[in-house]
Image (cartoon, coloured by chain):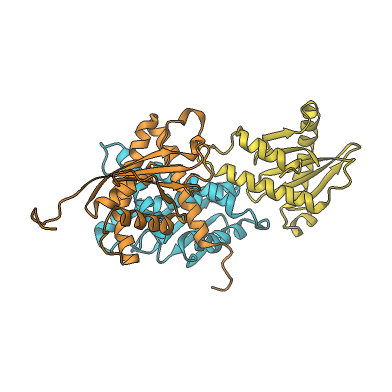
Amino acid sequence: MSRSTRFDTKKVNSELVTLTYGTLVAQMVKDLENPDDVSKQLDRIGYNMGIRLIEDYLSKTGSGRCLDLKDTADKIQTAFRMYLGVQPNVVNWSPAGDEFSFSLDSNPLTELVELPDDLKQLKYCNIICGAIRGALEMVQLDVQSWVVQDQLKGDPNTEIRVKFIRRLEDAMPAGED
Amino acid sequence: MEDTLLDLLHSEIINYTLQNGDEKDKKEEDLSGLEYIGFSTGYRIIERLTKEMPRFKDELDTMKFICTDFWLAVYKKQIDNLRTNHQGVYVLQDNAFRFLSRLSSGKQYLEAAPRYVAFTCGVIRGSLANLSIQCLVTAEVQSLPSCKFHIQVQRM
Amino acid sequence: MAVCAAIVGKDNSPKFFCCVNPDEELAFQFKVLSSLDIIEEKLNPTNKSASDNRELYLGQLYSLETCKIYGYVTNTKIKFIIVVDSTNMALRDNEIRSMFRRMHSEYADMVSNPFYIPGEAITSKMFDANIKSIITGTV
């Protein structure tokens, strides 16, 4: 290459993801009309991406099995940093230790987005919930994930909650650890 | 690291737009929805990218920008070959197109190739449109992962 | 400080207009639209001095008794216009350039909103507030 790069490739790629995702959401809103349907689709798309992202994550970090839910939370925290460039805080653990939240005070996906008044029900960040769900399913964890707080709706942070449902069966007979 | 995210998102957008299309006619895939998403994305990103840049001299200058800085930032490399007839037709050749490089070079993948380039055709069209160059963009894939983008500028 | 800012689209249709003093809006709108001709002239490729200057900032377009008008055109042919009160001697060229750059940045962010349709008038309240604070220097 004869000249130095004019643009910061990482930044451009990040902006490209943001803009592409935004355009996709806007298009879905036009196609599906009902914001709840759009939210569901976003979750599904996130799920499809999650089941593949986990492979990429595992190969890039060489992570072993997660010891417990806390360990899982930490690994997802790392994944946020790797793929979205932001590190959320892990907060609001339930007393039973089976639920926790990721709290983001900045989110590259939503940085430049202003939700119009008629789309206030839209769960713009549902793709993240779906991705968490899909990725964890691939490592035998069945979880639920949903948006609790949303900066696009005026909340101070975006909060995504994760609840552990059960461990999915490996091919191990019951009784063995 | 970000690359994976964009590649996966790109695949999901392809799936979404195809699943939304008409089930009846399976032969002709309607890629126009996909192209439109590319168009809108290209339109917006060029506004951000050209913020700090000096004014383009002319059409060729703009095309060169697309082939070098722009392609490098978005597709991780420069365009390998730019040809033009100096009358509004440009052919951009990328010998290792980012979204085709994951497909193996079998015949069945060649048939699916148009899906993987439709978004990019839209991105090019959208970027140029915002730079006041109206055009038609099509892509030609003869052997993976090489791709040629044909740009036909519409003179008003 | 500047008293008014306008954004005009590629096809010369107004996209955005804001005035610090709402009473003077109509008068300023007229002045802004007439400055479009001067912008066209500056951008005209046959004009020798125009093709030498590749900056986005066009400088002062013209000045009237009460105000001076400055222009800036992006590569995407969006025109930004700022009107400055003539009595304001303190505002330097550099400061006006920086106002335009900030306006451009705001505009680029606003266009990146997936729910904004390019070509439409700009109705975002946040954008309006941001531009107002840029031109009044309260950023």
Classify the position of the N terminus of chain C by image quarter.
top right
Classify the position of the C terminus of chain C by image quarter.
top right
Q: Position of residue B128 (x, y in %)?
A: 55, 50
| A121 over A139 or under it: above or below | above
Using the rendered image of the protein, determine whether residue A10 is visible from the camera's viewpoint. Answer: yes
Is B13 or A118 nearer to us in this picture? A118
Is A166 or B145 nearer to us in this picture? A166
The image quarter in which residue C120 lies: top right
Q: Position of residue C50 (x, y in %)?
A: 77, 54
Report the chain shown in orange. Answer: A
Using the rendered image of the protein, determine whether residue B32 is visible from the camera's viewpoint. Answer: no
Q: Which residue is depicted at the point 78% across and 49% down?
A: C96
Q: Which residue is depicted at the point 45% across and 57% down?
A: B149
Q: Residue furthest front?
A: A95
Q: How many marks are shown on the rendered structure?
A: 0
The colour chain C appears in is yellow
Is B68 or C83 nearer to us in this picture? C83
The colour chain B appears in is cyan
| A37 over B33 or under it: above or below | above
Left or right: B139 as drawn, with respect to C56: left
Q: Which residue is depicted at the point 59% across and 64% down?
A: A6
Q: Position of residue A30 (x, y in %)?
A: 42, 33
